[in-house]
Image (cartoon, helix red, strand yellow):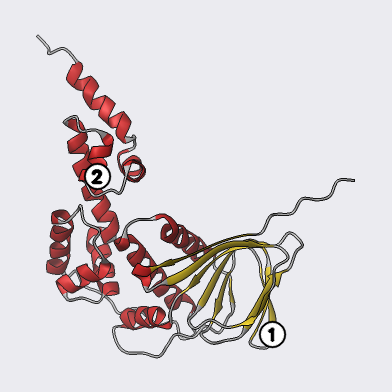
Amino acid sequence: MSRRAFPKERVKFWRDPVLRDLEMFHATYVTYAFSRHAHEGFGIAIVESGAMAFEYRGEMHVAPPGSVVITGPGEIHTGHAVLETGWTYRTLLPAIDWLQQAAEELVERPRTMPHFSSAVIQDPQLHRNLVALHRTLETSPSSLERESRFLWDMAHLIRHHASDRPLGKSVGKEARAVRLVRDYLIAHHTSNISLDELATLVDLAPLRLLRVFRKQVGLPPHAYLNQVRVNRAKRLLATGWSIIDTALETGFTDQSHLHRHFKKMVGVTPGQYLRGCKNVQDLPMPL
């Protein structure tokens, strides 16, 4: 009788200096079990498959796939597999000041540190958002995108799942601030712009800037910046620039970075667009 194959344990760990050294894991654990421990900041675990059991606040909890686990700063907890096949999850370990900032900017006034009474959250949309966020933090070279999406999703987490569920203060159009940010993104589209840079430019809190920009433009600043870059890339490709030179000239880190955003916005790859432009130029002139 053949032995059943189980997943191999694997761990990827990294920190993001742009996000105040935010620590992240993407791991599969099978036989490994965490001893009793606590984080200095919050612990956010996004369970992708399998199930994780853990002791927290004097009780045992089980987090099935599709759930999100929240542990508070300094609170002791454990962690081990429920099934013999283990579990796979993604984790975010934000410092206290990140969630404090998100909470205060959401209501635009000082407030206490957010508290989460439920250790295991069942919210499919939150789970999808956090998986997408974690993948972005793992792969995106854009500081603006990583900062913006992280702060936005932390505010969403607090708004929908903190114990007091704070209502976000309503925002107006603030047309001048949005216009200044748009002009700045166009003028500096080849730079690795930060969210704090934009917020300082218009003297708005970062989260408020994100909210008013999304409301008026329909896109967050990082997505608008990618649109500016792709439109510029189209013009260069149409005049015969190579794909790699176009990517570097328009602020993308490499050819694959351009390819990913170009295909999503234009519907064809940069190579297809370049060939199409050349074919048009090669057609005989009408008599």
Q: Residue furthest left?
A: 287
Q: Nearer the viewer, residue 41 or 202?
A: 41
| The quarter of the displayed image where residue 89 is located | bottom right
209 in relation to 248, above or below = below
How far apart are the alpha carbons under marks 1 and 2?
A: 54 Å
Q: Residue furthest right?
A: 1
**Position in image of residue 46 (x %, y %):** 55, 66
Whether residue 6 is visible to the viewer of this picture, yes or no, is yes
| The quarter of the displayed image where residue 20 is located | bottom left
38 in relation to 1, above or below = below
Residue drawn at point x = 9 percent, y = 9 percent = 287
Q: Nearer the viewer, mark 1 or mark 2?
A: 2
Residue drawn at point x = 12 percent, y = 68 percent = 176
Mark 1 residue crowding within 10 angstroms, few (<14) / some (14–19) / many (20+): few
**Position in image of residue 226 (x %, y %):** 27, 51
**Position in image of residue 284 (x %, y %):** 16, 12
Please tell me whether mark 2 sits on a helix, a strand or a loop.
helix
Amino acid at pointer 2: Leu
In the figure, is residue 184 to the left or right of 258?
left
Q: Which residue is mark 2?
A: 248
Q: Nearer the viewer, residue 47 or 79?
A: 79
Q: Which residue is mark 1?
A: 59
Please tell me whether mark 1 sits on a helix, a strand or a loop.
strand
Residue drawn at point x = 32 percent, y = 45 percent = 254
| The quarter of the displayed image where residue 206 is located | bottom left
Please tell me how many numbered marks the rendered image carries: 2
